[in-house]
Structure formats: structure tokens, C-alpha cells
Image (cartoon, rainbow, N blue to C red):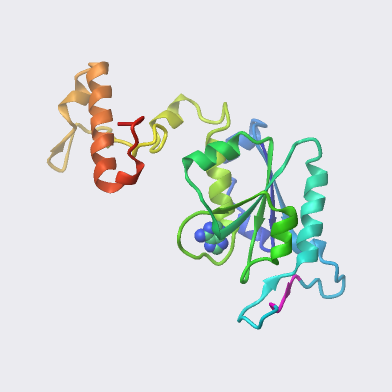
């Protein structure tokens, strides 16, 4: 998987991908991540301006279309032959969930466009964007943190990225349900014991208990996730 991230704040990504699972995935050559400054694609060489006032007189600024279009075209050239999907991070987009993550993980490459200010000129969306994605019903200062969330969630699903140790199979949402509670040593902590069944070594009973707990937690916290398939 190749990620090409287009942003006005490339410095925000310093460190975000330099540890743990993503770092290992990059080192193994399973993913590659390019970070590109949209300002470098400004058509105004002197001031490198990237924003302008919105028609209609709303408060705030918009990202101008020309630098965005230039940046996306350049990204598509870099990813020629890799079928890139252009994803614009916006609170008005499709709500990110594990199904959307799975869909994105099947692509060969993703161009993640990070908005700033009040957003981008609609004509860029019309002509260049394949999918709009939101990470939740709240407003962040820009698309950078949402793009990091997409890179992280998608990378976990690339074959070979997760070893047995941190397998996706025990993640919440893997089966469409929230994950069951987890315990490690010691057997008794601050007066609370690890549930007996987990110490029994009886794998079928353990699976049954875990599924039951997943169902209980999902029923209480996220009944909207329960479907005929996962009950
Ligand atoms: N940009 C600002 N807020 C956002 C959100 N919730 N999701 C995606 N992009 C955003």
C-alpha cells in the first residue's frame, strides 16, 4: 500500500509514523508513506498563497483550487499504474468505520487530501476527489489527524503487518462487535480476580465466554452494531 498525503502542515506528521507497527510496516516494505506540502504546488510563486475568500461572503477562508489540483495531479503521476483513490478528509464525509477501512485497505494506493480553513473549493471535490471521509461527528482543525487515523487503521489490515502477537482478530469490530474484556497477570489485582474460565485452559469455553462478553458489551454500549450475522 502506498499512501501519498497532501497537507499544508507536513511537520505534523513528524513522529506520527516513526514508531511501532507503522514503522515496522514501512521497514518491511509493506507500506510506503509520502508527505507532500500543498504550498509547493501554488501557482503564485512569489507569495505561495493557498487560501482565498469564499464567494458569498461567509466568514473564514477556503483552500484555493489551483494548488490542490496541481498537488493531486502530481501525486497521481507519482502513483501512475497504482490506481490511486483520492480521499478528502472532511467532517462532511462518509463516517469512517471498520468496513470503510477494509474497503480502503483493498486499494493499491491512497491519496489523502487534508483540508484546512473552511475547506476546499467544491470544484476540486467535483473533479478530483473519489471519496470523502470523516473520522467522527466533531470538527478538528484540519484533515491531518484524520489522515493519520486512516493510515494507522488501514496499515493494520495489510497482510504481514500484524504478527500473531497483535493480531487483528481480537480487535474490536473484527467480527462487527466490540471486543471482550482482556486480562493479564497477576491473577488477583486490587481484589479483583481474573475470571475463572480464562484460567481453565478449556479453549471452547473460553471462546464462548469471550463471544458472550462481546455481545453483552455491544448490546449495552453500541446496540446499533448488532446484526443478524454477528449475534
Ligand atoms: N477535518 C476536520 N474535522 C474532520 C473530521 N471530523 N473528519 C475528517 N476530516 C476533518
Residue 207 in the image: state x and y as whole percent: 28, 23
Residue 24 placement, left or right of 2: left
Q: Position of residue 133 (x, y in %)?
A: 57, 52
In the visual, does 225 lie left or right of 43?
left
- Residue 20 shows up from this direction: no
- Residue 219: quadrant of the picture: top left
- Expressed as whole percent of the image width and height from the top left, the position of residue 212 reads 23, 31
Locate residue 1: give its quadrant: top right
Number of marks in picture: 0
- The stretch in magenta equals 50-54
Compare residues 42 and 84 and report the one nearer the observer: 84
Q: Residue at x 60, y 56 (%)?
A: 89
Residue under the image location 45 percent in, 31 percent down: 168
Residue located at (57% from left, 26% from top): 160
Determine the residue positioned at 53% across, 49% down.
149
Residue 146 among magenta residues: no
For residue 54, say whether it is visible. Answer: yes
Q: Main secondary structure of the magenta part?
A: loop
Q: Name the quarter where the C terminus is drawn.
A: top left
- Percent position (x, y) of residue 43? 85, 67
**Vertical side of 229 occupied by 54: above or below:** below
Amino acid at each position: 500500500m502506498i499512501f501519498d498525503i497532501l497537507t499544508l502542515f507536513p511537520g505534523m506528521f513528524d513522529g506520527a509514523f516513526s514508531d511501532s507497527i507503522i514503522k515496522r510496516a514501512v521497514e518491511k516494505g509493506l507500506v510506503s508513506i509520502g508527505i507532500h506540502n500543498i504550498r509547493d504546488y501554488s501557482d503564485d510563486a512569489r507569495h505561495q498563497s493557498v487560501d482565498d475568500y469564499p464567494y458569498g461572503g461567509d466568514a473564514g477562508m477556503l483552500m484555493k483550487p489551483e494548488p490542490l489540483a496541481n498537488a493531486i495531479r502530481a501525486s497521481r503521476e507519482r502513483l501512475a499504474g497504482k490506481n490511486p483513490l483520492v480521499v478528502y478528509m472532511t467532517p462532511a464525509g462518509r463516517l469512517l468505520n471498520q468496513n470503510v477501512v477494509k474497503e480502503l485497505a483493498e486499494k493499491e494506493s491512497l491519496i489523502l487530501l487534508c483540508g484546512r480553513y473552511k475547506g476546499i473549493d467544491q470544484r476540486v471535490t467535483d473533479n478530483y476527489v473519489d471519496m470523502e471521509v470523516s473520522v467522527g461527528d466533531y470538527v478538528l482543525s484540519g484533515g491531518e489527524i484524520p489522515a493519520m487515523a486512516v493510515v494507522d487503521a488501514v496499515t493494520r489490515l495489510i497482510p504481514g503487518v500484524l504478527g500473531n502477537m497483535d493480531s487483528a482478530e481480537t480487535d474490536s469490530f473484527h467480527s462487527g462487535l466490540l471486543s471482550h474484556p482482556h486480562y493479564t497477570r497477576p491473577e488477583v489485582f486490587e481484589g479483583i480476580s481474573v475470571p475463572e474460565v480464562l484460567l481453565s485452559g478449556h479453549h471452547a469455553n473460553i471462546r464462548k465466554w469471550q463471544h458472550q462478553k462481546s455481545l453483552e458489551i455491544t448490546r449495552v454500549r453500541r446496540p446499533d452494531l448488532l446484526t443478524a450475522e454477528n449475534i
